Amino acid sequence: MLFKGKKAIVFGGTSGIGLSTVVKLVQEGAEVIAVGLTEGKAVPELPEQVIRDWCDVRKSEQVASIFERYGQLDMIISTATGGTRALGPFLEMDMTGYRNSFDKLWGYANVVRYGAKWLSKNGSIVLLSGSPARRCGQGQIALSSVGAAVEAFVKGVAKEVAPNRINALCPGVIDTPIVKLSKSEKEAYYAARTKHHLIPRVGTADECVQGIVFLLSNEFVTGTVLDVDGGAILAT
Ligand SMILES: NC(=O)c1ccc[n+]([C@@H]2O[C@H](COP(=O)([O-])OP(=O)(O)OC[C@H]3O[C@@H](n4cnc5c(N)ncnc54)[C@H](OP(=O)(O)O)[C@@H]3O)[C@@H](O)[C@H]2O)c1
């Protein structure tokens, strides 16, 4: 077991990529705290030994008190989206929507600011950006701006976190509850979104988790961004 005796906290651990990360870390022997936004939300996929907690990652005092509650940690992962995502042409965009898209960055910043001091020796942090960070598709200016900021943040703060580590995983189009469509609508949406990708299909949360596990476990990797995107950023 890769993470036996290790303790991890996963912000966003109640859905999508974060939830799959929690399940994998438990399978690999870690003690895991899964933090979500919605208090009391039923998440039947969570293994019963997982400790559940709630906070709004946008609120620094809530994030700080979560860390105080659990003490020393070996792994800190945040996949929490933070807020809403503004999509569509920037020149027609509601500026509140554009600003709110940065809640993901503020959430990550809170997690690192208040969490880094609780990391044990050889501790590791993983955050998630997104392929628009380096290939901005139509209507993705907000996602691109935030994603690029997350990647710059990770590279910058890696120097302060060292010798502990921080990395980002950059997903492409991944099938998770972030897309609020019916099953058939999702199929059509994913097919259209991925048809020009080198691997023309939607990715799975588990494929992202493979990357997260690599970033958590390889002790010689820091300040990097690992793309798990089916070649999305190379699409023509
Ligand atoms: N899925 C994709 O195609 C894709 C592509 C590129 C990048 N990403 C990035 O990957 C990350 C994970 O995405 P996902 O698809 O797994 O999302 P998801 O399924 O929608 O899960 C979002 C998680 O974030 C939590 N959350 C949201 N706002 C929060 C807040 N203010 N405070 C605390 N927790 C909060 C949610 O908690 P509740 O369960 O309580 O609501 C949930 O656990 C995100 O950063 C996203 O931008 C995803």
Image (tube, rainbow, N blue to C red):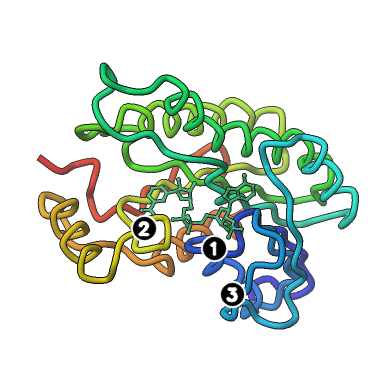
Tag in front: 2 or 3: 2
Three-letter amino acid code at the position of disc 1: Val
The spot of residue 236 in percent (x, y) is: 9, 40
Under circle 2, the secondary element is loop
Residue drawn at point x = 38 percent, y = 23 percent: 94
Q: Amino acid at mark 3?
A: Val
Pointer 1 residue? 213
Quarter of the figure with residue 54: bottom right
**In this rendering, position of residue 45 left or right of residue 138:** right
Instruction: Identify the residue position indicated by label 3 in the image.
Output: 23
User: Mark 2 = which residue?
Assistant: 180
Dot 2 or dot 3, earlier in sequence: 3
Q: Mark 1 falls on what kind of element?
A: helix
Quarter of the N terminus within the rendering? bottom right
Other residues around mark 3 within 10 Å, as few (<14) / some (14–19) / many (≥20)? many
Q: Residue at x 71, y 67 (%)?
A: 40
